[in-house]
Amino acid sequence: MLFFAAMCGAAQSAEHAAGIKRVVLDWTEGGKGSNAVRDRLAEKRKALGKVEIVQDRAKADAVLHGSAVLWTTGYVAMSPRSRAAEEPIYQGYATAELTALDGKTLWSYLATPRHQGWKSITDDLADQLASTLSEALVRKEPRAGTPEAATGPTTTIPPLSS
């Protein structure tokens, strides 16, 4: 089920991440485009609200692990008569996981390209990670067992009569 949720681009939130103020970035070198996604995510600090990206793990409240993998699936020629002006078509994904300093997962997300309307695939993937992380950091999720955590009205099933 978790795998299905991740494949659909849904965020996993094992525990609410509200209250995180400083995050250290731990990015895995994934190849072509991976560092561009990391750099764009770091630029989107303003989108992350009041969260600061720090360099020192000792000053951080949490660790944001991430990686991106991109590959070329083909080329589009700007002119059918010339191959000199071809643009590559990319596909790929970016993944991020926010963990507490003890390693407990607070949030995770798998981003895939939304559509061909983006400027670049790296910007699209980084923007998705930044916006969903921002939502997770400001969302106040109810704790299990509290009345706010109830998902709906309780229904009583009457006993079967013979």
Image: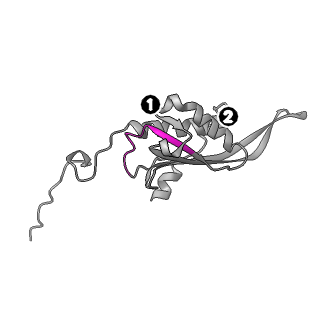
Q: Which residue is tagged 1? A: 50
Name which of mark 1 and mark 2 comes first in the sequence: 1
Q: Which residue is tagged 2? A: 120
Residue at far left of view: 162
Front-most of residues 118 and 144: 144
Amino acid type assigned to the residue bearing label 2 in the image: Ser
Residue at far bottom of view: 162
Local crowd size for mark 1, using a 10 Å CA cut-off: few (<14), some (14–19), many (≥20)? some
Residue 17 position within the rendered picture, expressed as x and y whole percent measured from the top left: 40, 44
Local crowd size for mark 2, using a 10 Å CA cut-off: few (<14), some (14–19), many (≥20)? few
Residue 7 position within the rendered picture, expressed as x and y whole percent measured from the top left: 53, 52
Q: Is residue 68 left or right of residue 62?
A: right
Q: Which color scheme is applied?
A: one colour
Residue at 12% x, 67% y is: 160
Residue 53 position within the rendered picture, expressed as x and y whole percent measured from the top left: 53, 37
- Mark 1–mark 2 Cα distance, whole angstroms, equals 26 Å
Question: On residue 142, which mark appears?
Answer: none
Front-most of residues 8 and 81: 8
**Mark 1 near mark 2, Cβ–Cβ under 8 Å?**
no
For marks 1 and 2, give the one nearer the viewer: 1
Q: Is residue 6 left or right of residue 69?
A: left
Amino acid type assigned to the residue bearing label 1 in the image: Lys
Q: Quadrant of the C terminus?
A: bottom left
Residue 4 position within the rendered picture, expressed as x and y whole percent measured from the top left: 49, 56
Question: What kind of secondary structure does the magenta stretch mostly adopt?
Answer: loop
Circle 1 SS class: loop
Circle 2 SS class: loop
**Residue interval drawn in magenta:** 15-25
Residue at 47% x, 53% y is: 5
